[in-house]
Image (tube, rainbow, N blue to C red):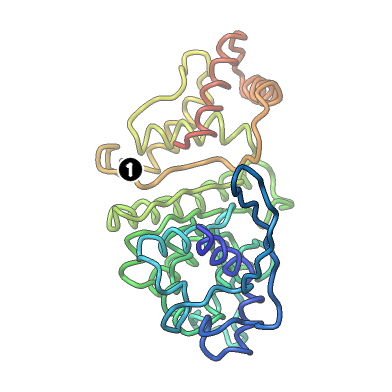
Amino acid sequence: MALLRRVLINIRHPKRILKRGKENKQLGAAPLNPNHDEEVEETVISNGASHLISRNFPSSVQPLNGGCCLFRLPAELLSIIYEYVLTEEKGLFSLCKIPLDNSTWPEQYTQLSSSPHWLIESNMLKYVCRQLYHDTRGLGIRFNKVEFSNRWTYPAYMQFLDFFKMCSPANQQRLCVVITDKDNCIASPRPATQYRGMITEDMLNSIHGMIEFCQEHPKVQVLYRTNLLQFSYQMAITGPALARAFRGIDIHDYRHFGPIIKNEINNIATRLQRGRDADCLDTPNFRFWPMLESWDLETCTVGLRYFLENHGAYPPDWVVHEVAATLALWCYWGL
């Protein structure tokens, strides 16, 4: 356990390993600082009396035959250590740059970061030595979900497709990606009806492309999130249309929604299906989430009622609360 504790400490502080590695061409071949020992106090019981003695232990663990102690651990333990070190709480984010010559997107323009805003290398182990570089290369994709979001005119879905082509066959089978479709034109001066229709068509095209991809690659998990359209529209219309088109289910009781909302749900579901039924489009490895950081049931209930009344629907309170509760489950589990 003492050896494992030292290995974990050194892994969590790769700069410390780099600094000490300059003093030792082969990591762990000798004490990294032989002049510095740490004094450990032990209590020894002898003849019923306890005596406090001091012993000096080297500050680094010496392998018996040279070489790094880390690489002498069993493969199962190494996998646990790598997973612990390389797993990010919020996953990885894809950052891309725009090439000046408007050419195709080469590999170096898509980088994975621990931050969605600037490049922060998540795998510092690969800078320690060649062996760690070889052993940990690509593990970040295996242990984390990868989020792609719109960057300038480079759609999130296209980023993902280009990134997928560059992944190794082994990583292609383990990918879990989040495609965040953020609207970059929210301040459009167009009338609300034109603006809403334009955004909906873009969203439907992206979703259909992802559905076809998921059908071709059943082991890849794709989570689709969008802030296109306002919250109430997603909750009352887009979500039910997706459920009907791709899952063959109705998540709401539409008897109290009025003809306007029901017709719009039917129209979007028909456009989503494009001549195919839900049995052909039901793809378990594709799920849809609204872009919500938190869920306030009371606030969302008020917003939902306001939206329904503006569309000629005046459902009773129990219907609104029931719909809001269903939407809360959707936000938690996905669709």
197 to 69, vertically: above or below: above
Q: Is residue 261 shown left or right of residue 309? A: left
| Quarter of image, res 185 | bottom right
What's the amino acid at mark 1?
A: Pro
Task: Residue at 55% x, 56% y: name it.
Answer: 91
Q: Secondary structure at mark 1?
A: loop
Residue 254: x %, y % from top left: 47, 18
Question: In the picture, which quadrant includes the C terminus?
Answer: top left
**Rendered residue at 39%/56% (across/down):** 209
Q: Residue at x 65, y 62 (%)?
A: 115
Nearer to us in this view, 207 or 177: 177
Q: Position of residue 79 (x, y in %)?
A: 41, 62
Residue identifier under label 1: 284
Report the front residue among 329 and 45.
Answer: 45
Q: Is residue 304 left or right of residue 78?
A: right
223 sits to left or right of 5 = left
Answer with the quarter of the image where residue 307 lies: top right
Q: How dense is the environment of label 1, judged by Cα within 10 Å: few (below 14), some, or many (20 and up)? A: some
Q: Is residue 302 above or below residue 132?
A: above
Q: Residue at x 59, y 69 (%)?
A: 10
Q: Between 156 and 147, which is closer to the camera in this rendering? A: 147
Frontmost residue, 312 versus 305: 305
Q: Position of residue 274 (x, y in %)?
A: 33, 45
Q: Which residue is outermost to the left?
A: 280
When asked about the image quadrant of residue 9, the answer is: bottom right
